[in-house]
Image: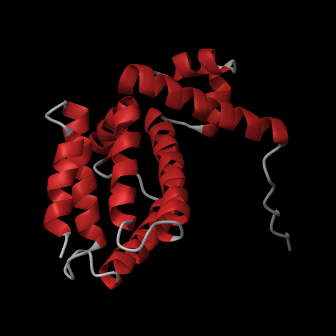
Amino acid sequence: MSRPTPRRTPRADAARNRDRILATARTLFAEHGSGVQLPEIARAAGVGIGTVYRHFPTHTDLVEAAAGQRFAEIEEFARRECRDGAEPGTALARYLNRVGEILAADRGLSAAVESARHSTGSEPRGEARTRLEAVLGEIVELDRAAGTLRADCTVADVYLIVGALSATIRTGAGDWRRLLAVVLDGLHR
């Protein structure tokens, strides 16, 4: 009878390579958008193409990992600065402003995520998104309890707003800050 093989943690150099690849990819996506290919990322990260493919077998896998990392960063901000650190009734506005700033500063990754959505039929998923949705629910409840947010506002509404911000920023269709001000005014009680 064979014993199950224990899960190994990645070697330190493999973890460093993965982190370097992700950081490089995010930088290149920010500068050049979704057209950046894996060989370019490998060269810029100073690793071989095989190393990139071992960690991210497809371009979409790399985009999803970069998006997952961004989701985790946004979730941490939402938890620390909005849920735990905002004045009562200001958490959702603080969150949405920060997301707008991130999307405006990182249009290339947003374009890569949008491109990946079209090729896979779905948006990036995972544990980071699940945690983000949970903290968004808490933020919505905090602002409702403070009496500043409409009772019918949901996490799904927040995602619609973020989608509108993303589209406005990505396409340059208008001033995302003005859009957000109008939306937040509509959400207030």
Residue 175, position as x, y percentages in the image: 18, 37
The residue depicted at 28 percent of the width and 49 percent of the height is: 121
Instruction: Pick whichever, 174 or 49, lies toward us.
Output: 174
The residue depicted at 28 percent of the width and 53 percent of the height is: 162
Quadrant the N terminus occupies? bottom right
45 sits left or right of 142 in the view: right
Task: Tell me if residue 160 comes above or below residue 147 in the rendering.
Answer: above
The residue depicted at 39 percent of the width and 66 percent of the height is: 91
Residue 47, position as x, y percentages in the image: 69, 21
Residue 38, position as x, y percentages in the image: 52, 24
Q: Quadrant of residue 42?
A: top right
The residue depicted at 48 percent of the width and 70 percent of the height is: 83
Asked if residue 53 can be seen in this view, the reply is no
Asked if residue 101 can be seen in this view, the reply is yes
Instruction: Pick whichever, 9 or 97, lies toward us.
Output: 97
Q: How many marks?
A: 0
